[in-house]
Image (tube, helix red, strand yellow):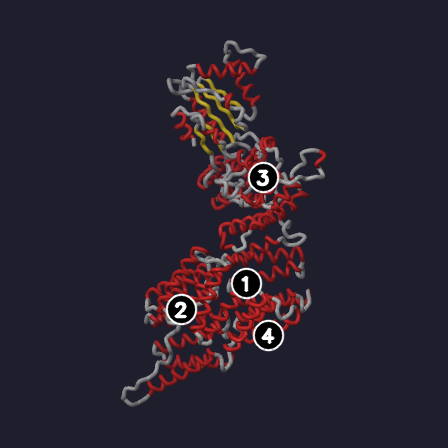
C-alpha cells in the first residue's frame, strides 16, 4: 500500500487511506510521514512542516490548524480567533515554497471537510488522510482512494512468528494454529497485534488461546486487552471497532442502526442475504427494537418501512461497519466487529434477537432449493452460525423451524453425510435440552433416521425407525398421526433393507390404520396405498402392484385433482408397473404424458420434471428406441448438471443411465469409461459403502464383462458380493443379485463347477427369501437349468460337436430410477 501512496504523491495527488477500524490506516500514515520527515532535505525530498490533525470533528481540525499558524508565527494570526488563524494557515499552505505534509487522521464526516482541505497550490505540499468511510467524494478532486485490507494468511504467519520470536517466545508459535487464530480474528492487524502481546504476556500456547477465542462466553476486552497494545494503535480493540457507531447513530434519523447491527452481528461473517432485514418478520421486530424517538411514543411503536431500513444500512456501509459489494450482494460484517457488537446486546434481549433473525432467514427460504441453490446454501450457513452463537435460543421453548429447514435443505442438495452429522447433533442437543421423550426430540430422531437412509446407512435407519415407532406408540399412542407416519416409514426401511415380506406385512397394516383413523381418502391414506403397491412390486406381485397403482391414480385424481404433484407421481408409478408387466408401449405412452404434465405444472427445471424426463429415456430404451433414449439421456444429464450441480446424487444417476444407453447403442468403450467415472464420483461423494456406490461397482463389472474383460469382471464381482454381504446382509435382494452375477462370471471364465455350485445356492436363497414364484427366482431357476445343460455337454465322452445353449444370458444393463 505504501507503494501506491508514494506513486500517487509522485503524480501530485492527495491520498485517502480507507478501511475498517484496526487495519492499520493510521499506522501506515505515520510510517509514510516519518519516512518523509527523516529524509534529507533537498529539492524534492524531506519536509519542512508536518501537521498531524485528528479529523473526527471540525473543531479538532480548526484547533490544529490554528496551533500550526501559531507555531509558524504567521503574520496576522490572532490567538483569540482560532477560525481566522486556521484560515490563515490554509492560505499560507497554498502560497509557501516550503515542503509540507498535512495528515487528516480518521475523517468521520467529509461534508464539512472540503472547506478545510488544504490546496497544494505550488505543488510543494501533500495531504494524506485516513477514514473508515468509502464515499465517492473521497476519490474526487484528483485524490487517490486507497483501500487498506486485512492481512493475508502468509502475512499473518510471518507477523506472528516474527513478533513471538522477537520477544524471545518463539516456542509459543505453532504454525498449524496460526491460520486458525487469523481466521477467528478475521485477519485484522489490530487484533493480531493484541493477540500476539497476550500470548507473550500470559505465556499461553496458541491452542489455549484458540479455545478462549472460540468460547462465546469470553469477552474481547479480556482476550485483546488495552494493555496488549504494543503496535501503537492507541485504543482498545472494542473501542476501535465500534468508534464510528456514534457517528452512524447521529446521522441515522430512523434509529434503526443499532438494532440492525444487533441482528447482523449474529450472521455469518462471510455474508448474509441483504433482503433478510426487509422481510415482514424483521420489520416487525425492528418496530419494537428501535428506541422510541419521543417520551410519549414509548408504548406506541410506529411501523418500520423498507426505506428506513435501506437508509440505516446505507449509513452502516458508509462507516464500514458492514460491507456489500453490490446492491444485491450479501451483507458482510467483520467477525470481530460482529463480536464487539454482540457484546453490546443486553443479555435479556439476545434470545429474542436470535429468534427474530431466525424468523427472517426462514421467511427467505425458497420453496424448492434447486430454484435458488446459492441462496439456500447461504441460508444454511447463517442458520448454523446463528445457532452456534446463541444456543440454546433456537431450542427453547421449542425448536425453531429453521433448524429443521437446514436438515431438509442438506438432503435436498445431496449432502447426505453433512445431513447425518447435522441431525446427530440436533438429536443430541434436543435430548439434552428437552429430554428423550419430548416431541421435538422425537422429531429430531425421525429426521436422523431419514438422513441415515439417504446416506445409505440402511441398517442404522431401520434400527432408529424401530425405536422411533416404539417411542411414538408409548408417548403419543398407537393411533396418533405421527405414530402412523413412523409406522409407514418403518415399512419403507424394511423394503430398503430387503426385508420384503416384513415391508409388505407392515405396509398392509399401515394402510388399514390410515383408513380407520384418517379415512379412505385422506392424502396420507393415499400415500400408504401407493407405498403398499411398491411392496407388492418388490415381492414380485406384479399384477397386484399394477391394480393398486391404478386405484391410487384414480383416487388421487378424484381427491387431489389431475394436476396435483402427488397425482403426477401416481401416474408416473403406474407407468413403472406397466413396464414391469411387459406393457412397454403403455408405459411409454403414459411417461410421455407424465413428462408433459410435469413441464406444464412444475416447470421444465423442477427436479420432478427432470426425473420424468429421465424415466421417459428409460422407456425409450425398453421399447428399443435406442437413439431416442440416448439423446434424451444426454439432455437429462446436462439438465441435472445445470440445475442440481455435477455432484448431486441425481446427476450421478443420470450419468449412470447414459452409460446404459451407450451400451445399448453399441458404444461399449464410452459406456465403460462413463461407468468408471460414475463409480469414482459415487465413492467420492457418497462414500465407498453407499448402496448406490455398490450398484455402480456392480454395473462397472457388467461393463467389463460386455467388453470381454472376463477376469476384471470376475474380480470386481467378487468384491461386489463381499461388499454387499457386509453392508446389506447375505439375504438382501441386491446381495442375491451379486451372487447370481458372480456365477455368470465363473461361467465366462470356464469355472463351470463353481458357476453350477453358486447357481444352486442362488436358487435356494431366492426361493427362501423371495418365494418360489418371484420373477428373480424364476430367472435363477432358468439359469441353473442352463448351467446344468452346459456342464453335461462338456462331460459328454463322444467326439461329435454338440451345440449347447449358453449357461446364462449376457448381463442386462438396468437403468436406475431417480434417487
Q: Looking at the image, is mark 4 or mark 3 earlier in the sequence?
A: 3
Q: Nearer the viewer, mark 4 or mark 2?
A: 2
Residue 406 spot, x, y in % from top left = 56, 54
Question: Going by the image, does 641 lie left or right of 111?
Answer: left
Residue 294 spot, x, y in % from top left = 69, 33
Label 3, label 2: how many angstroms apart (C-alpha)? 55 Å
Q: Nearer the viewer, mark 4 or mark 1?
A: 1
Could you tell me which quadrant the N terminus lies in? top left
User: As rendered, which of 94 and 791 lies closer to the eye?
Assistant: 94
Q: Looking at the image, is mark 2 or mark 1 earlier in the sequence?
A: 1
User: As rendered, which of 414 and 564 lies closer to the eye?
Assistant: 564
The residue beneath circle 3 is: 309
Q: Nearer the viewer, mark 4 or mark 3?
A: 3
Q: Nearer the viewer, mark 2 or mark 1?
A: 1
Q: Nearer the viewer, mark 3 or mark 1?
A: 1
Q: Which mark is residue 620?
A: 2
Label 4, label 2: how many angstroms apart (C-alpha)? 34 Å
The residue beneath circle 1 is: 564
Q: Secondary structure at mark 4?
A: helix
Q: Indicate whether 530 appears above or below 177.
A: below
Label 4, label 1: how many angstroms apart (C-alpha)? 25 Å
Label 4, label 3: how many angstroms apart (C-alpha)? 56 Å
Q: Secondary structure at mark 1?
A: loop
Q: Is residue 212 visible?
A: no
The residue that appears at 38% across and 18% down in the rendered structure is 42
The residue beneath circle 4 is: 508
Q: Indicate whether 654 appears above or below 44.
A: below
Label 3, label 1: how many angstroms apart (C-alpha)? 40 Å
Q: Indicate whether 623 appears above or below 265.
A: below
Q: Looking at the image, is mark 3 or mark 1 earlier in the sequence?
A: 3
Q: Nearer the viewer, mark 3 or mark 2?
A: 2
Label 2, label 1: how many angstroms apart (C-alpha)? 26 Å
Amino acid at each position: 500500500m505504501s507503494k501506491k501512496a508514494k506513486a500517487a504523491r509522485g503524480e501530485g495527488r492527495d491520498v485517502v487511506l480507507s478501511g475498517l477500524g484496526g487495519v492499520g490506516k493510521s499506522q501506515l500514515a505515520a510510517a509514510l510521514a516519518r519516512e518523509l520527515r527523516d529524509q534529507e532535505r533537498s529539492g524534492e525530498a524531506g519536509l519542512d512542516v508536518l501537521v498531524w490533525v485528528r479529523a473526527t470533528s471540525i473543531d479538532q481540525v480548526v484547533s490544529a490548524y490554528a496551533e500550526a499558524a501559531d507555531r509558524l508565527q504567521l503574520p496576522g494570526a490572532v490567538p483569540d480567533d482560532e477560525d481566522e488563524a486556521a484560515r490563515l494557515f490554509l492560505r499560507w499552505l497554498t502560497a509557501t515554497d516550503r515542503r509540507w505534509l498535512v495528515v487528516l487522521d480518521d475523517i468521520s464526516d467529509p461534508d464539512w471537510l472540503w472547506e478545510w482541505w488544504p490546496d497544494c497550490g505550488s505543488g510543494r505540499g501533500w495531504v494524506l488522510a485516513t477514514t473508515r468511510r468509502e464515499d465517492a467524494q473521497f476519490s474526487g478532486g484528483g485524490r487517490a482512494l486507497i483501500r487498506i485490507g486485512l492481512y493475508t494468511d502468509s502475512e499473518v504467519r510471518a507477523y506472528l512468528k516474527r513478533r513471538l520470536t522477537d520477544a524471545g517466545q518463539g516456542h509459543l508459535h505453532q504454525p498449524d494454529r496460526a491460520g486458525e487464530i487469523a481466521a477467528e480474528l478475521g485477519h485484522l492487524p489490530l487484533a493480531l497485534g493484541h493477540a500476539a502481546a497476550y500470548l507473550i504476556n500470559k505465556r499461553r500456547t496458541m491452542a489455549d488461546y484458540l479455545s478462549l477465542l472460540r468460547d462465546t462466553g469470553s469477552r474481547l476486552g479480556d482476550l485483546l486487552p488495552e494493555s496488549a497494545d504494543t503496535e501503537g494503535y492507541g485504543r482498545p480493540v472494542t473501542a476501535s471497532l465500534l468508534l464510528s457507531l456514534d457517528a452512524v447513530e447521529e446521522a441515522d434519523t430512523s434509529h434503526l442502526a443499532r438494532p440492525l447491527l444487533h441482528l447482523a452481528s449474529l450472521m455469518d461473517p462471510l455474508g448474509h442475504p441483504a433482503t433478510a432485514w426487509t422481510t415482514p418478520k424483521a420489520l416487525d421486530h425492528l418496530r419494537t427494537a428501535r428506541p422510541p424517538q419521543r417520551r410519549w411514543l414509548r408504548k406506541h411503536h410506529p411501523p418500520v418501512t423498507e426505506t428506513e431500513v435501506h437508509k440505516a444500512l446505507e449509513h452502516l456501509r458508509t462507516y464500514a461497519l458492514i460491507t456489500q459489494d453490490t446492491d444485491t450482494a450479501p451483507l458482510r460484517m467483520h467477525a470481530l466487529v460482529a463480536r464487539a457488537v454482540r457484546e453490546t446486546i443486553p443479555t435479556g434481549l439476545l434470545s429474542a434477537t436470535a429468534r427474530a433473525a431466525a424468523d427472517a432467514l426462514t421467511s427467505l427460504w425458497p420453496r424448492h432449493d434447486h430454484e435458488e441453490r446459492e441462496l439456500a446454501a447461504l441460508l444454511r450457513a447463517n442458520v448454523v452460525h446463528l445457532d452456534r452463537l446463541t444456543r440454546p435460543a433456537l431450542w427453547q421453548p421449542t425448536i425453531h423451524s429453521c433448524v429443521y429447514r437446514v436438515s431438509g435443505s442438506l438432503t435436498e442438495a445431496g449432502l447426505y453425510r453433512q445431513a447425518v452429522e447435522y441431525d446427530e447433533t440436533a438429536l443430541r442437543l434436543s435430548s439434552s435440552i428437552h429430554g428423550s421423550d419430548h416431541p421435538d426430540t422425537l422429531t429430531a430422531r425421525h429426521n436422523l433416521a431419514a438422513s441415515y437412509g439417504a446416506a445409505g446407512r440402511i441398517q442404522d435407519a431401520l434400527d432408529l425407525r424401530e425405536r422411533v415407532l416404539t417411542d411414538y406408540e408409548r408417548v403419543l399412542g398407537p393411533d396418533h398421526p405421527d405414530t402412523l407416519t413412523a409406522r409407514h416409514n418403518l415399512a419403507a426401511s424394511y423394503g430398503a433393507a430387503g426385508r420384503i415380506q416384513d415391508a409388505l406385512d407392515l405396509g398392509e397394516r399401515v394402510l388399514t390404520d390410515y383408513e380407520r383413523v384418517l379415512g379412505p381418502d385422506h392424502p396420507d391414506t393415499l400415500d400408504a396405498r401407493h407405498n403398499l403397491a411398491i411392496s407388492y412390486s418388490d415381492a414380485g406381485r406384479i399384477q397386484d402392484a399394477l391394480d393398486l397403482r391404478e386405484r391410487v391414480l384414480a383416487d388421487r385424481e378424484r381427491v387431489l385433482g389431475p394436476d396435483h404433484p402427488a397425482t403426477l407421481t401416481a401416474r408416473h408409478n403406474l407407468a413403472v408397473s406397466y413396464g414391469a408387466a411387459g406393457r412397454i408401449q403403455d408405459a411409454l405412452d403414459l411417461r410421455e404424458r407424465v413428462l408433459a404434465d410435469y413441464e406444464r405444472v412444475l416447470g421444465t427445471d423442477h427436479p420432478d420434471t427432470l426425473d420424468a424426463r429421465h424415466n421417459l429415456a428409460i422407456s425409450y430404451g425398453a421399447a428399443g428406441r435406442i437413439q431416442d433414449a440416448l439423446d434424451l439421456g444426454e439432455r437429462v444429464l446436462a439438465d441435472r448438471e445445470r440445475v442440481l450441480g455435477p455432484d448431486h446424487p441425481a446427476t450421478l444417476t443420470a450419468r449412470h443411465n447414459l452409460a446404459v444407453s451407450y451400451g445399448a447403442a453399441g458404444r461399449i468403450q464410452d459406456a465403460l469409461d462413463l461407468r468408471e467415472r460414475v463409480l469414482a464420483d459415487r465413492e467420492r461423494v457418497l462414500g465407498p459403502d453407499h448402496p448406490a456406490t455398490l450398484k455402480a461397482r456392480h454395473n462397472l463389472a457388467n461393463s467389463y464383462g460386455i467388453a470381454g474383460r472376463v477376469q476384471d469382471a470376475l474380480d470386481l464381482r467378487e468384491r461386489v458380493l463381499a461388499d454387499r454381504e457386509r453392508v446389506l446382509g447375505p439375504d438382501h435382494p441386491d446381495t442375491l443379485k451379486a451372487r447370481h452375477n458372480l456365477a455368470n462370471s465363473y461361467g465366462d471364465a470356464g469355472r463351470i463347477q463353481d458357476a453350477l455350485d453358486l447357481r444352486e445356492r442362488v436358487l435356494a436363497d431366492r426361493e427362501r427369501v423371495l418365494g418360489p414364484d418371484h420373477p428373480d427366482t424364476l430367472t435363477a431357476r432358468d439359469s441353473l437349468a442352463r448351467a446344468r445343460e452346459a456342464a453335461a455337454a462338456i462331460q459328454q465322452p463322444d467326439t461329435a460337436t454338440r451345440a449347447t445353449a449358453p449357461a446364462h444370458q449376457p448381463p442386462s444393463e438396468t437403468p436406475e430410477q431417480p434417487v
